[in-house]
Image: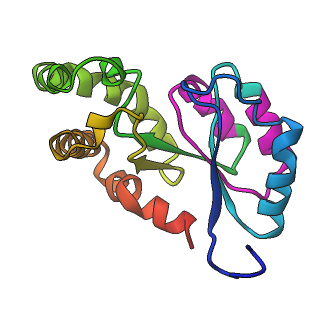
Amino acid sequence: MLALRPGLFTGFGEVGDSPTEPINPPPDAPIYSGNFQVASANNLLVYFHPGAGHQENLERALQQFPNVKFLIHGDFVRPYLDGLMERNPNVYFTANDIFDEAIPMFRFGAKQTFIDTMESDWDINLAKAVEMYKPLIEKYPNRFMWGTDRVDIVWNYDTDVGLLLAKFGRAFIGELDPTVQEKFAYQNAEALLQ
């Protein structure tokens, strides 16, 4: 496809682990190496979701393919981001609008319960998300971006839920240093795609 449609593809992914697919191999597994070689040869971004406990495997993949830009996401890897970013200039992170660590009830339960809880615990959830991500985003202002990856629950695609999460995302972005807000909101994503 790369030969048939030059310039059509900017990246490769999403690949990796997820809470619904916990048996996927770690990021440095041989099954992914060929894909990363193709990404390297064609200047493609790799979008990867590391699984729980895969931070060391991820770092090996980052170091094995230093000219490949890896855009990763997932709360499993957040506690290790500072070290990963410090040691690997080719890793980027997208914070998604579910902030699963701060808002774990997103995955379970009824839609109205989620909406009611989001609204009643708004300030608590926002404060948790800011505490977890703001220092990292401001330390690496060119390597974080806003994302919209959501879990596969039918109601999470409903308009009212989408609007609520967009409102939460804007509130979160508003808590960042003003010099970082537009970078995080869209400029870093644009730069990666160029």
Q: How did the renderer colour the structure?
A: rainbow
Q: Which residues are magenta?
A: 57-86
Find the residue positioned furthest to the front. 154
User: Which x, y percent locates residue 11?
Assistant: 64, 62
Counting from the top left corner in percent of width and height, residue 82 is at 59, 32
Q: Residue at x 38, y 60 (%)?
A: 186
The residue that appears at 63% across and 71% down in the rendered structure is 9
Q: Does residue 124 lie above or below 94 as drawn?
A: above
Task: Name the residue nearer the viewer: 193 or 149.
Answer: 149
Residue depicted at x 66% and y 31%: 83
Q: Quadrant of the C terminus?
A: bottom right
Residue drawn at (14%, 24%) of the image: 112
Does 165 appear above or below 193? Answer: above
Q: Does the magenta run of residues contain 131?
A: no
Nearer to the camera, 56 or 161: 161
Position of residue 70 in the picture relative to residue 160 (left or right) = right
Does the stretch in magenta take in 62? yes
The part of the image, by quadrant, that contains residue 35 is: bottom right
Residue 41, how many percent across, how many down?
84, 67
Position of residue 5 in the picture relative to residue 123 (left or right): right
Residue 111 versus residue 61 in the image, above or below: above
The foreground one among 39 and 69 is: 39
